[in-house]
C-alpha cells in the first residue's frame, strides 16, 4: 500500500513529485489532513532518495491561501465566487456566443507546461479540444521544445520518438545549451544530474559544457567554453565538418547500425564542408584548435553523446541546430548505442497510441507561420487577436498556462487579452494572464489527484513505471481538471458520436484510471497492469535503456529519413548571418534556477527565500563599458520594450552577454499571489521579440535578443522608477477598476 499507518496517527505516503521532469520519488509524512514533511524516497528505483528543493512546494501549493477553491467570475466590483453549474454554463455560453458570431476558429486555446505533469489532464484533454472545434490552438511547445519534435518526426517517423543521453553509462558527454543541474534534465528525465555527471568523471570520463554562461552544470564539468548566443549552429556545422575531415565518419561507418538505416547518410559528407573550425571561431568565440580537439575527444571516447537543449532550441537556428546535434550522434555511431543517444521504452507507449505529427498543413492568418500537429507558434498569438479581419480571435481559453509571462512580447499579449469578447482560464490562481478572464475554473491541487507520468517516462534515462494514488481526498465541491474538461465537452459537443459519449460517460463514472490501465496492458511489458503498479508503491525498475533500432523507427520503410534537402536549404540563412554578424551587440539570454519552474512556483515561500534571483547578470567588462555598478538599477531595452532591473556583475557571463531569468514579472496590477508579488522581479518576455523566430520551425527565438543598456543613476532613479511603474501597470483590466482583477 502507498500509505502506511503508524501508532501515532502519522502516516507515510509515497508518490512521484510532479513539479518538473525529473520524476523524483518522494516520501510524505502526514496526519490525514495536513502534510508534516516531504523528503526523498530512498526506495524509489529511479531517484533513489534524491529530491530537489521544488518538492516541498507541493505542500505550499496545496495549502496556498491564494489558490482558488471555487470558480470565480470577474465583475465590476471584483472577483465573485459562483457555483460550478453556473460557471460551466456561462463558459459554454460565452464560447458558443463567440463562435456563433465570428466562426469556430475565432475562439482560441493555449495549453501551458503543467498540463504534461497531469495524469487526468493528459488522458482527457482530447475531449476538451475536440469539443471546442477550433483550429486556433497554441501551446508552450513552440517556446521550448518544438525543434526536438520536428527532428524526431522527420528522422524517426514520430514527434515523440526522441532519444535521450544514456548518462548512466556514457564516457563523454557534450552538453550544448543545457543546464541539467537546474532543470533535472529537460527532454532528458534524469534526477540527481549532479551525481550522474560526477559519476561520468569518476569512471574516467569527461563532461564538456558549451554555454554563454558558466552555469551550475558548467561549474562541475570537466571543461566549459563560452559561446556567443545563437551561434551554436556554426559550432555544430564546424564539428560535423571536422568529423569528416578527421576521418571519424569513415571509421564509425564500419559498425554504425544507425547510419546503415539512413539512405542519405553519404550526403552529409558535404553538408558542412563550407564551415571550417577557423571560419567560425571568431563569431562563436571558441578557438579553432579547441573545436578540433573536442571533435577528436568525442570520437575517440569509448562512448559519447551530444546533448543539445534549451539554449540551441530557442534561437533563430533552433531546428537546424537540433538536427545537427542529432546528425553528429548518427555519423559518429553514437545513436542507439550504450553510452550514446538511446530510445526509452516506456510502459505506456504514447508513440504507438498517437499520431506522428506534421508540419505546415496550415499557416497562421497574420504572420503566415506553419502549424505543427495542429498548433500554431505562440509568437503568432497576439497578432491573431489584435489584427482585425475575418478569423480574428475574439475569445480565448488558457489551460494551466501563463503566456503573458512565458511567451515573447508579453506586454503586447497582455494588451491583446484585454480586448477579447470572452476569456476563460482553467487555473489555480489569478495570475498575470488569468486576471483577464471572465471566469476562472480551478482544479484540485496536485496532492488531491492520482498520478502516473504519461509523458516523462518517454524521456527517462532509465526505464521505470510508478503509480501514485491521491494523498488527500478532494472536497466534494471541488473538481478534477478532467472533470472540468468533460463537463465542458458535454455542454459544447452535444452532437458527439455515440462512441465518444460512451467513453466520456465511462470516464466521468470511474475516472481516467481505466484509460491508463488499458495503456499499460497494451504496452511493451507483458503482465503490466494498473493493479501491479498499485502493489509497488515505490515503482517498478524496468531496466536500463536498450538498443531499439530498427524497431523504434515509425517510418513504414523502417529507415531513418535525414531530409537533407529540407535542412540544407536553411544554410542560406546561416551564410547571411555570418556575413552580417555584428559582434558589438549586447545579447540577452534567459536562465533557470533549481528553485523555480517557469512562472508557477513563485508563490511558494520556501522557493523564493534567499537573495533575489531576478537580476541582470553581466560581465565586469560589459558593466564597465556602460558604467554599471553591482546592485545598480539598469534599464534594459529591446525592440519591443524596456524593464528596469538590478545588476549582478559576475564573470559567469561572457562579455557582451546579459541574462535575466525566465518566469518573473509579478508586479502587474490585479495579480492575486501575495508572495510572488512580494518577489515580483521583471519579465524577460517583456523584452523578447515576437518577430524574432526560427523561420524553419516557427519556434520562438528568446535567446540572442539584441538589447541596449542604460545605468540608472541616483538623480534620475525616482523619475525612471515612476515611469517604469506606470508602464508595467498600463495593462490593468479596464472592466474591473475597483476589484481584484484591477
Image: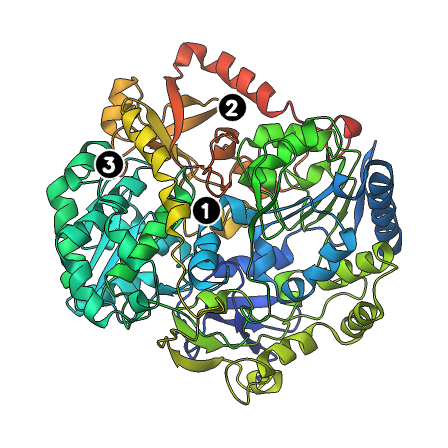
Left or right: residue 96 compared with residue 275 = right
Residue 626 seen from this side: yes
> Which residue shows up at 47% across the image and 61% down it?
21
Q: Where does label 3 land, which residue?
A: 284
Q: CA distance from mark 2 to mark 3?
A: 26 Å
Q: Is residue 296 above or below residue 511?
A: above
Residue 3 seen from this side: no
Left or right: residue 280 compared with residue 409 = left
Total marks shown come to 3
Q: Nearer the viewer, residue 672 or 500?
A: 500
- Determine whether the residue tagged by mark 1 lies in a helix, strand or loop: loop
- Determine whether the residue tagged by mark 2 lies in a helix, strand or loop: loop
Q: Where does label 2 land, which residue?
A: 640
Judge depth for marks 2 and 3 and give the one in front: 3
The picture places residue 180, in percent across and down from the top left corner, at: 36, 55
Marks 1 and 2: in contact by CB < 8 Å? no
Judge depth for marks 3 and 1 and give the one in front: 3
- Determine whether the residue tagged by mark 3 lies in a helix, strand or loop: helix
Residue 300 occupies quadrant: bottom left
Q: CA distance from mark 2 to mark 1?
A: 31 Å
The picture places residue 560, in percent across and down from the top left corner, at: 39, 63
- Which colour scheme appears in the figure? rainbow
The picture places residue 450, in percent across and down from the top left corner, at: 64, 71
> Which residue shows up at 83% across the image and 47% down it?
91
Circle nearer the N terminus (2, 1): 1
Of the numbered discs in the image, which one, if any, rests on residue 484? none
Amino acid at each position: 500500500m502507498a500509505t502506511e499507518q503508524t501508532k501515532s496517527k502519522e502516516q507515510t505516503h509515497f508518490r512521484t513529485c510532479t513539479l518538473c521532469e525529473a520524476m523524483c520519488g518522494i516520501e510524505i509524512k502526514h496526519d490525514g489532513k495536513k502534510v508534516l514533511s516531504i523528503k526523498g524516497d530512498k526506495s524509489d528505483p529511479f531517484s533513489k532518495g534524491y529530491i530537489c528543493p521544488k518538492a516541498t512546494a507541493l505542500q505550499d501549493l496545496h495549502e496556498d491561501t491564494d489558490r482558488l477553491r471555487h470558480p470565480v467570475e470577474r465583475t465590476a466590483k471584483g472577483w465573485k465566487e459562483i457555483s460550478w453549474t453556473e460557471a460551466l454554463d456561462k463558459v459554454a455560453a460565452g464560447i458558443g456566443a463567440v463562435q456563433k458570431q465570428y466562426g469556430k476558429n475565432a475562439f482560441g486555446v493555449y495549453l501551458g507546461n503543467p498540463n504534461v505533469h497531469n495524469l487526468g489532464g493528459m488522458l482527457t484533454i482530447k475531449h476538451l479540444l475536440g469539443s471546442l472545434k477550433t483550429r486556433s490552438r497554441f501551446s508552450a511547445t513552440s517556446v521550448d521544445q518544438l525543434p526536438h519534435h520536428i527532428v524526431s518526426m522527420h528522422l524517426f517517423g514520430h514527434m515523440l520518438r526522441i532519444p535521450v543521453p544514456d548518462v548512466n553509462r556514457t564516457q563523454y558527454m557534450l552538453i550544448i545549451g543545457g543546464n541539467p543541474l537546474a532543470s533535472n534534465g529537460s527532454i532528458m528525465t534524469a534526477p540527481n544530474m549532479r551525481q550522474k555527471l560526477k559519476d561520468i568523471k569518476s569512471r574516467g570520463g569527461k563532461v564538456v559544457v558549451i554555454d554563454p554562461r558558466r552555469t551550475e552544470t558548467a561549474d562541475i564539468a570537466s571543461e566549459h567554453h563560452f559561446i556567443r548566443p545563437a551561434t551554436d549552429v556554426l559550432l555544430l556545422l564546424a564539428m560535423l565538418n571536422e568529423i569528416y575531415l578527421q576521418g571519424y565518419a569513415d571509421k564509425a561507418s564500419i559498425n554504425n547500425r544507425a547510419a546503415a538505416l539512413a539512405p542519405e547518410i553519404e550526403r552529409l559528407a558535404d553538408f558542412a564542408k563550407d564551415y571550417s573550425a577557423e571560419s567560425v571561431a571568431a563569431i562563436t568565440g571558441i578557438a579553432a584548435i579547441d573545436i578540433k580537439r573536442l571533435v577528436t575527444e568525442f570520437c575517440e571516447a569509448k562512448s559519447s553523446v551530444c546533448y543539445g537543449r534549451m539554449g540551441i532550441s530557442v534561437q533563430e537556428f533552433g531546428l537546424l541546430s537540433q538536427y545537427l546535434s542529432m546528425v553528429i550522434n548518427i555519423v559518429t555511431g553514437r545513436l542507439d548505442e550504450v553510452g550514446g543517444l538511446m530510445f526509452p521504452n516506456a510502459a505506456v507507449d504514447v508513440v504507438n497510441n498517437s499520431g506522428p505529427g506534421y508540419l505546415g498543413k496550415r499557416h497562421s492568418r497574420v504572420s503566415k507561420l506553419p502549424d505543427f500537429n495542429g498548433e500554431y507558434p505562440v509568437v503568432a498569438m497576439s497578432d491573431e487577436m489584435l489584427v482585425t479581419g475575418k478569423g480574428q480571435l475574439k475569445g480565448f481559453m488558457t489551460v494551466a498556462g501563463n503566456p503573458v509571462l512565458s511567451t515573447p512580447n508579453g506586454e503586447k499579449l497582455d494588451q491583446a487579452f484585454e480586448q477579447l469578447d470572452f476569456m476563460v482560464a482553467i487555473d489555480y490562481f489569478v495570475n498575470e494572464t488569468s486576471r483577464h478572464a471572465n471566469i476562472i475554473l480551478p482544479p484540485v491541487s496536485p496532492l488531491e489527484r492520482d498520478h502516473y507520468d504519461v509523458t516523462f517516462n518517454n524521456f527517462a534515462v532509465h526505464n521505470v513505471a510508478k503509480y501514485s494514488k491521491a494523498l488527500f481526498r478532494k472536497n466534494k465541491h471541488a473538481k478534477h481538471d478532467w472533470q472540468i474538461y468533460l463537463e465542458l465537452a458535454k455542454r459544447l459537443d452535444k452532437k458527439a458520436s455515440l462512441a465518444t459519449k460512451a467513453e466520456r460517460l465511462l470516464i466521468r463514472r470511474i475516472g481516467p484510471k481505466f484509460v491508463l490501465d488499458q495503456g499499460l496492458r497494451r504496452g511493451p511489458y507483458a503482465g503490466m497492469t494498473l493493479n501491479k503498479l498499485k502493489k509497488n508503491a515505490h515503482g517498478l525498475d524496468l531496466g536500463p535503456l536498450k538498443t531499439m533500432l530498427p524497431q523504434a523507427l515509425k517510418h513504414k520503410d523502417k529507415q531513418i529519413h535525414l531530409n537533407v534537402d529540407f535542412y540544407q536549404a536553411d544554410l542560406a540563412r546561416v551564410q547571411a548571418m555570418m556575413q552580417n554578424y555584428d559582434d558589438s551587440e549586447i545579447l540577452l539570454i534567459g536562465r533557470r534556477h533549481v528553485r523555480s519552474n517557469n512562472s508557477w512556483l513563485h508563490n511558494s515561500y520556501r522557493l523564493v527565500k534567499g537573495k533575489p534571483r531576478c537580476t541582470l547578470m553581466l560581465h565586469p567588462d560589459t558593466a564597465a563599458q556602460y558604467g554599471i555598478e553591482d546592485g545598480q538599477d539598469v534599464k534594459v531595452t529591446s525592440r519591443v520594450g524596456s524593464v528596469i532591473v538590478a545588476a549582478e556583475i559576475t564573470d559567469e557571463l561572457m562579455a557582451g552577454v546579459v541574462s535575466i531569468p525566465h518566469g518573473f514579472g509579478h508586479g502587474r496590477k490585479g495579480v492575486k499571489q501575495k508572495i510572488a508579488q512580494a518577489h515580483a522581479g521583471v519579465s524577460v518576455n517583456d523584452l523578447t521579440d515576437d518577430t524574432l523566430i526560427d523561420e524553419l520551425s516557427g519556434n520562438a527565438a528568446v535567446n540572442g535578443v539584441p538589447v541596449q543598456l542604460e545605468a540608472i543613476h541616483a538623480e534620475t532613479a525616482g523619475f525612471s522608477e515612476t515611469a517604469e511603474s506606470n508602464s508595467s501597470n498600463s495593462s490593468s483590466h479596464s472592466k474591473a477598476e475597483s476589484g481584484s482583477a484591477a
